[in-house]
């Protein structure tokens, strides 16, 4: 009797059953508490993976509570995210980094409707986890989510950095068509930042990508940059309203539609002034030719 040892494994199993029962009864706060107890017992038993799973489930109970609009409401969402982040740390410690990345991705989706800043942070953390595992496709996809939200938040300097990192990852895994689309996004972001040189550099660097030179993406960006440089607002508007740009991800499509030539005022390209009729201005070259219109005879 003096050598009695707590049965943490059995206690955790019973708490898991209780959590499911509370969940089925839509008693989400009690379900959360039961999952937290389960996580505590698993931690005592040094079963980190199962503890992490229980913490994640506890966080999800708060999410379900919020989605049902019960008395807890959305203020519980930060607590839910905190629990999922704690779970992700334990997943990494347990050597299951992929599960950690997926948990952070889910947390980002949960918080995105109410806190874009936190969602960016979570997506970036998830991308970092996958990058450390050399799972570059998943890392690039998560960075893509972060980039789009940074554009929405008008944090364009950070969006430019994020897009470049995305593009480098897609290049490394030889997904060149996606690199082309990232080049378009980069150009739009840099032009909105007022950095024409950086936009032009992105296109020039992309010439090294197989298939980019001469592609629709390439020609479109060359045309846009040339028109932007010449302050030709008609051409800029035509390119930005083309299907290639209009049907990009919504945040980038909005950048395209709202792009204006600096100092253009939103009108057409200014034409050279024409001398008023009957004025004192000298004749134009066309008028000088008209003197000989009937010939010399």
Image: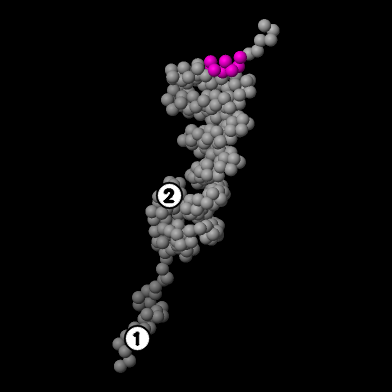
Report the disc number at residue 291: 1
- Give the answer, above or below, for where 42 lies relative to 85: above
On-image quarter of the N terminus: top right
**What residue is disc 2 on?**
248
Task: Please name whichever residue, 119 or 273, is drawn nearer the observer in this view of the structure.
Answer: 119
Q: Is residue 73 magenta?
A: no
- Can residue 262 be seen in this snapshot? no
Task: Please name whichever residue, 192 or 51, is drawn nearer the observer in this view of the structure.
Answer: 51
On-image quarter of the C terminus: bottom left
The stretch of residues the image draws in magenta is 7-15
Residue extending farthest to the right is 2
Task: Please name whichever residue, 123 or 52, is drawn nearer the observer in this view of the structure.
Answer: 52
Question: Which residue: 35% across, 77% down?
Answer: 278
The mark closer to the camera, 2 or 1, is 2
Report the disc number at residue 213: none
Question: Which residue: 63% across, 13% down?
Answer: 6
User: What colour scheme governs how the chains and residues are painted in the rendered image of this protein?
Assistant: one colour
Crowding at mark 1 (Cα within 10 Å: few <14, some 14-19, many 20+): few
Residue 269 rendering spot, x and y as whole percentages: 42, 64
Question: Which residue: 48% across, 35% down?
Answer: 109
Crowding at mark 2 (Cα within 10 Å: few <14, some 14-19, many 20+): some
Task: Please name whichever residue, 129 or 74, is drawn nearer the observer in this view of the structure.
Answer: 129
């Amino acid at each position: 009797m003096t050598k009695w040892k707590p049965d943490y494994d059995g206690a955790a199993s019973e708490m898991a059953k209780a959590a499911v029962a509370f969940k089925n009864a839509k008693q989400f706060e009690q379900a959360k508490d039961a999952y937290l107890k389960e996580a505590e017992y698993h931690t005592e038993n040094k079963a980190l993976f199962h503890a992490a799973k229980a913490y994640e489930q506890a966080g999800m109970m708060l999410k379900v509570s919020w989605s049902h609009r019960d008395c807890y409401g959305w203020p519980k969402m930060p607590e839910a995210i905190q629990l999922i982040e704690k779970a992700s740390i334990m997943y990494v410690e347990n050597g299951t980094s992929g599960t950690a990345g997926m948990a952070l991705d889910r947390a980002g989706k949960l918080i995105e409707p109410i806190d874009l800043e936190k969602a960016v942070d979570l997506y970036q953390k998830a991308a970092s986890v996958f990058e450390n595992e050399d799972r570059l496709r998943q890392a690039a996809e998560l960075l893509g989510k972060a980039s789009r939200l940074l554009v929405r938040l008008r944090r364009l300097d950070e969006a430019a950095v994020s897009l470049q990192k995305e593009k480098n990852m897609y290049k490394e895994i030889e997904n060149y068509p996606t690199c082309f689309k990232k080049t378009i996004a980069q150009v739009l972001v840099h032009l909105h930042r007022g950095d024409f040189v950086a936009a032009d550099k992105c296109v020039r660097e992309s010439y090294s990508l197989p298939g980019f030179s001469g592609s629709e993406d390439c020609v479109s960006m060359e045309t846009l940059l040339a028109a932007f440089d010449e302050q030709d607002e008609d051409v800029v508007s035509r390119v930005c309203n083309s299907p290639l740009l209009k049907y990009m991800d919504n945040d980038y499509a909005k950048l395209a539609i709202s792009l204006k030539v600096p100092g253009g005022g939103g009108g057409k390209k200014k034409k050279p002034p024409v001398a008023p009729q009957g004025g004192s201005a000298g004749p134009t070259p066309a008028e000088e030719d008209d003197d000989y219109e009937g010939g010399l005879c």
